Image (spheres, rainbow, N blue to C red):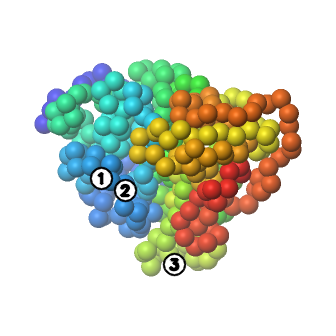
Amino acid sequence: LLTLNRKHLISPSVLKMTLSNGNGVTHEDVSEYYGKTLGATEDLKTNACLTDGAPPAFIRDCLRNIHPEVIAKYYGCGLCIPDVLEGLTVLDLGCGSGRDVYLAAQLVGPKGKVIGVDMTTEQINVAKETQEWHATKFGYSNTEFHQGFIEKLEDITELIPNSVDVIISNCVINLSPDKESVIRNCYRLLKPGGEVYFSDVYSSSRVPKSLAEDKVLWGECISGALYWNDFHNLAKDCGFLDPRLVKDSPITVSNPKIEETIHAYSPNLKFYSATYRLWKLDDLESHCEDYGQAVIYKGTIPRCGGAFTLDGHHVIETGKVFPVCGNTWKMIKDTRLEPHFQFIGNFDRHYGIYADCGTLIPFESAKSGAGGGGDAAAGCC
């Protein structure tokens, strides 16, 4: 085994801290579940932490460069790697054994850096013990790992406010007993114009106390799921003023005993795996306002030559004049995406709110029964 770098460990007294979800499930329960109860992906009792979709070819190429033990310990519910990462600083919350850290490390390249944080000793040890192996495989070393709680990122002194370009997280925030602290810390650590790009589990209505007290359901990413509208409001309260849904798919659970437990409360309680992006832009508006603006995508983002997907409602074809609301304009103009677009218009004249900027459940899979992310070609909103 490789020698661990002690400066990446926080004090044992901090690691013994116990936070509860208010229903009896604690950090220790989650750490026990992922560190000892689960030995590999096959030990999961539901499909909530898994995804059926095959990753794109370039991700498959990157996966071939990742140590088999890291892959075996993967428990994520989606792929949460955004475009345009070269040279950036990326933070992975709840990195586990480090799969997504080592994926992102190949995409940011030797001039970038990827930081992983996880509370579970067994998981973080796998990530650290394979650092040297991955550095040799990649031809450079650009990763670091810290053991700690994602609710207490301020205790990791190496994480400096306004220093991170992109924060990723893969089916982890729902496990946290203090989701507000996690999201507020994300805002604190991001540079202006940075983003949180993450996959997680959400519910169609609020999860009842009877399910939230079930430690297995919590560990399986089910009973810790936020009601989607509570998540939207929480994100806005923490400074992320316009949460954008990228894609979603229904979670079928595929475990008769657990399905029976959920249906005993309500057959209408549904769960979804969804990827969101949250931009740190302080001047976004509460709704999609029309200023007569448009953008033209240059087709210059790697692997996005024909079109760029900003979110489920914005698949922007190369060379086409694409109408956007004021918020979408800023998500492109005031972020790392700006060099890849031309911009038409300004904020001098306001034409009202975009149609369909409503408050219904956002998940396309709730409407159609299949995965989706909106009418992608329609522009705002």
Q: Is residue 78 left or right of residue 191?
A: left
In this view, 357 is above or below 153: below
Residue 111: x and y in percent read 34, 24
**Picture quadrant of residue 225:** bottom right
Where disc 2 sits, the SS reads: loop
- Mark 3 burial class by Cα count in 10 Å: few <14, some 14-19, many 20+: few
Cβ atoms under marks 1 and 2 closer than 8 Å: yes
At label 1, the amino acid type is Arg
Where disc 1 sits, the SS reads: helix
In this view, 348 is above or below 74: above
Report which residue position mark 3 lands on: 260
In this view, 25 is above or below 107: below
At label 2, the amino acid type is Pro
Among the two numbered marks 2 and 3 on one chain, the one whose residue lies closer to the N terminus: 2
At label 3, the amino acid type is Glu
Residue 90: x and y in percent read 42, 32
Residue 337: x and y in percent read 54, 34
